[in-house]
Image (tube, rainbow, N blue to C red):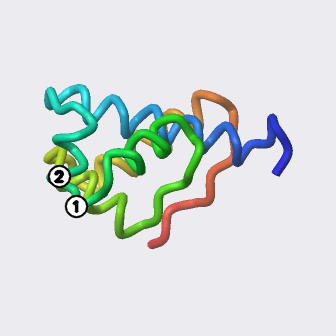
């Protein structure tokens, strides 16, 4: 993947939202990791973009921060659109 490809920028948006969700509920990385049944090192790597998050981990992260998948998708899509990046249309 190229350094400034749309996917790379979308991954940065994803990581930023996840970190914001954690901070908004007042959790440090250790507490989020415990709630989401992850390792703290993985939380750190996901937030810094070193590693991508899979769908099941995403659901655990969202549950740990009391955020639902639909709201997350809406926020992600909104930010992607504001950045002028393409995003696949929602399934009907």
Q: What residue appears at the point 61 percent right and 42 percent down from the top-left corner?
A: 10
Asked whether, in this view, residue 12 is left or right of residue 58, the answer is right
Specify the quadrant that holds the C terminus: bottom left
Asked whether, in this view, residue 43 is left or right of residue 50, the answer is left
At label 2, counting other C-alpha atoms closer than 10 Å, the crowd grade (few under 14, some 14-19, many 20 or more) is few
Position of residue 69 relative to residue 20, above or below, is: below
Q: Nearer the viewer, residue 74 or 36?
A: 36
Query: How many numbered badges does the structure rendering display?
Result: 2
Q: What residue appears at the point 42 percent right and 67 percent down from the top-left corner?
A: 55
Q: Nearer the viewer, residue 92 or 5?
A: 5
Image coordinates of residue 82 in percent, x first then y, are 58, 28
Image coordinates of residue 18 in percent, x first then y, are 37, 40
Cα distance, mark 1 to mark 2? 5 Å
Position of residue 24 relative to residue 60, above or below, is: above
Q: Which residue is mark 2?
A: 34
Q: Nearer the viewer, residue 3 or 30?
A: 30
Asked whether, in this view, residue 71 is left or right of residue 31, the answer is right
Picture quadrant of residue 69: bottom left
Indicate which disc residue 6 carries.
Answer: none
Picture quadrant of residue 31: top left
Image coordinates of residue 75 in percent, x first then y, are 39, 39
Q: What residue appears at the point 35 percent right and 62 percent down from the top-left corner?
A: 57
Q: What residue appears at the point 22 percent right and 31 percent down from the top-left corner?
A: 28
Position of residue 58 relative to residue 17, above or below, is: below
Asked whether, in this view, residue 4 is left or right of residue 65, the answer is right
Image coordinates of residue 87 in percent, x first then y, are 63, 51
Secondary structure of the residue carrying tag 2 is: helix
Secondary structure of the residue carrying tag 1 is: loop
Q: Residue furthest right?
A: 2
- Marks 1/2 in contact by CB < 8 Å: the verdict is yes
At label 1, counting other C-alpha atoms closer than 10 Å, the crowd grade (few under 14, some 14-19, many 20 or more) is few
Q: Which residue is mark 1?
A: 37
């Amino acid at each position: 993947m190229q350094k400034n490809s749309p996917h790379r920028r979308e991954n940065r948006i994803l990581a930023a939202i996840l970190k914001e969700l954690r901070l908004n509920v007042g959790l440090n990385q250790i507490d989020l990791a415990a709630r989401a049944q992850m390792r703290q090192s993985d939380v750190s790597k996901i937030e810094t973009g070193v590693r991508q998050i899979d769908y099941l981990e995403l659901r655990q992260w969202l549950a740990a921060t009391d955020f639902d998948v639909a709201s997350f998708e809406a926020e992600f899509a909104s930010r992607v659109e504001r950045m002028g990046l393409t995003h696949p249309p929602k399934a009907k």
